[in-house]
């Protein structure tokens, strides 16, 4: 499990990243589905294939630590969300938008007439501009 017989047929090698093998036989490792990868060599199960950054999976189960498990189809992260990979898709802060495929909250931009607030370089909120100081660029 998680290993395959080497080309010289003398040793068992770990399946590389982005592959898995759950049967203890001489077959090759299986590639993770499109837009997914594993975190380590020697992965055993399909559910160890997690979405790449910018992708999300509606058929994955969210665990207590907000990580996704199970499922095998990853699609482009939708507008107004960001998908850092492995973690479940997360909504942009209120009053902001993002393009599809966003991987970071910093790809969310505040709407026109809203001002960005950052904490440690990370967008945290978008607050309405004071009257007569409207933002024309958003953010």
Image: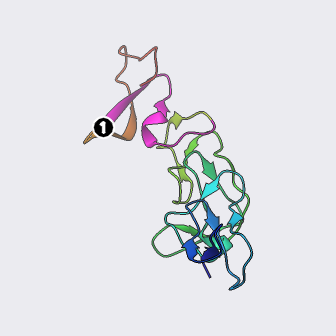
Q: Residues within 10 Å of mark 1 (few under 14, many from 20)?
A: few
Residue 72 location in percent, x, y? Answer: 72, 64
* In the rendered image, the vertical position of residue 96 relative to residue 5, given as above or below: above
Residue nearest the observer in this picture, 32 or 58: 32
In this picture, residue 52 sits left or right of residue 72: left
In the picture as drawn, the residue positioned furthest to the bottom comes out as 24
Specify how the rendered protein is coloured: rainbow
Q: Nearer the viewer, residue 18 or 74?
A: 18
Assign the C terminus to one quadrant of the image. top left
Q: Quadrant of the N terminus?
A: bottom right
Residue 90 percent across, percent down from the top left: 53, 52
- Pick whichever, 6 or 118, lies toward us: 6
For the point 60% across and 33% down, the residue is 99
Give the image location of residue 28, x and y in percent. Answer: 72, 70
At numbered mark 1, what does the secondary structure look like: helix, strand or loop?
strand
Give me the residue at 25% from left, 42% from top: 120
The residue located at (68%, 80%) in the rendering is 22
Left or right: 64, with 49 as reference point: left
Q: Residue lying furthest left in this view?
A: 120
Residue linked to disc 1: 118
Q: Residue 40, relative to residue 96: is it above or below?
A: below
How many numbered discs, if any?
A: 1
Which x, y percent locates residue 82?
54, 45
The part of the chain drawn in magenta is: 100-117
Specify whether residue 105 is painted magenta. Answer: yes
Q: Is residue 19 magenta?
A: no
């Amino acid at each position: 499990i998680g290993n395959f017989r080497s080309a010289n047929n003398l040793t068992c090698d770990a399946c590389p990243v982005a592959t898995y093998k759950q049967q203890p036989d001489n077959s090759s490792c299986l590639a993770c589905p499109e837009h997914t990868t594993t975190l380590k060599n020697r992965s055993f199960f399909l559910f160890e294939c997690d979405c790449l950054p910018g992708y999300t999976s509606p058929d994955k189960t969210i665990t207590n630590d907000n990580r996704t498990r199970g499922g095998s189809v990853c699609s482009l992260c939708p507008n107004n969300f960001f998908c850092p990979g492995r973690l479940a898709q997360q909504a942009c802060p209120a009053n902001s938008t993002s393009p599809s495929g966003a991987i970071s909250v910093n790809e969310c931009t505040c709407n026109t007439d809203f001002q960005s607030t950052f904490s440690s370089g990370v967008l945290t909120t978008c607050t309405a501009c004071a009257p007569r100081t409207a933002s024309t660029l958003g953010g």
